[in-house]
Amino acid sequence: MATMRDVATRAGVSAKTVSRVVNNDRYVSTEVRQRVEQAIAELKYVPNMLAVTFRTGRDAAIGVAVPGVADPFFAGIISAVEREASRRGVAVIVTSVGWEPSHEQQSIEALLHRRVAGMIICPVGPDMSFLRPWQARAPLVFVDRMPGKLTADAVVQDDVGGGRQAAAHLVDHGHRAIAFIGDDVVTGVLRLQGCREALADAGLSLPDGLVHLGGVDSESVTAALHGILAQPDAPTAVFSSNARCTVSVVSALQAMGRTDVAVIGFGDFPTAAALRPAITVVDQNADEMGRFAVQRLFDRLDDPDRKMRRRTVLPVSLVTRTSCAMPGEPAPTGH
């Protein structure tokens, strides 16, 4: 039975290129694609992920571990992974590890013990070194956040750049006192860094008293907002570091009857455009992130001897709606 390497040798290309042709990757020239397809036909090569199962003892499945499957961002990543995996006849097993780092290792290792072919992981805790022994058995690709204390392939977004965009947008609307509310994971810290940089560029500062890095549940955010808005130089705008936090911020402000505080969030969510005012967000492309991550994982499976691990940083974009206006400012036209 012909192998992928046999096809690569016949076509005069690498095994990775054969994999790209098999998976209909658009980044293959017409001439190369024709050579590979001809070699596949001549050798009667049949791609079959099940062969990996028999050869290595691993499942013809990959795992995905995210904090919460109900979160729209992570749901988008899962959907993209499932779509790309189905083209290879590969199943996807999803686990929700929750938002507490203490549960993470047990949940991830439970899936790895099932001998999946590889895993895509969104880390929650700051220390992923427990996965070092597993890297020799199955390729691991991280999404959304870089793994702490572990060198691995990763696909992340431009958190600092997105934080800069959000804060600069508020400054452009005339806000000078801006609060930041988010969780204390690495993405939140990076988005706070971008926010501070944009304010510094505008000759402004972000006092520690206007920053909440911690719980983003409704109770925690409500308590933080009460304290922040009670200060003498209270902010006229809030930058929220993720979609879960933004929902809590909006709910808390509504409960307080505060319609005079602008809101911008990092990460879109299903009701953001339907709220009044509609929430301006820094948009993360979950579909693109999922596609990049699963392709990176399949590259590792196709070429296990690859040594270099890569980090890909995807750009983010601002979706402008109506929630950032100063009191009395005419509402811009949203989209």
Image (spheres, rainbow, N blue to C red):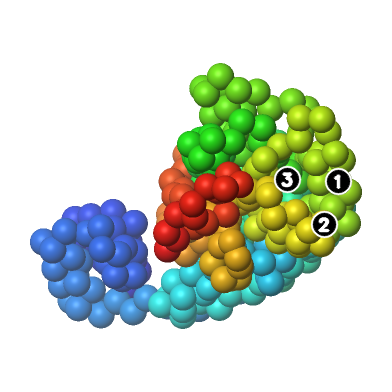
Which residue is under mark 2? 256
Q: Residue at the spot x=68%, y=49% of the render?
A: 260
Q: Is residue 211 placed above or below 295 in the rendered structure?
A: above
Residue mark closest to the camera, 3 vs 1: 1
Q: Is residue 150 above or below residue 104?
A: above
Task: Tell me the number on the disc at residue 182.
Answer: 3
| Residue that extends furthest to the front in the rendered view of this protein | 328
Report x, y in % for residue 123.
Answer: 69, 51
Determine whether, in the image, residue 220 is placed left or right of residue 13. Answer: right
x 19%, y 55%: residue: 12
Label 3: how many Cα within 10 Å (few below 14, some 14–19, many 20+): many
Numbered circle sitting on residue 226: 1
Query: Disc 2 on helix, strand or loop?
Result: helix
Q: Which mark is residue 181?
A: none
Residue 63, placed above or below residue 168: below
**In this rendering, does residue 151 appear at all?**
no
Q: Amino acid at mark 1?
A: His
Label 2 and label 1: CA atoms lie apart by: 9 Å
**In front of the other: 302 or 20:** 20
In the image, residue 200 sits, relative to residue 296, either above or below, namely above
Secondary structure category for the residue under label 3: strand
Residue type (three-letter) at the residue carrying disc 2: Met
Cα gap from disc 3 to disc 1, whole angstroms: 15 Å
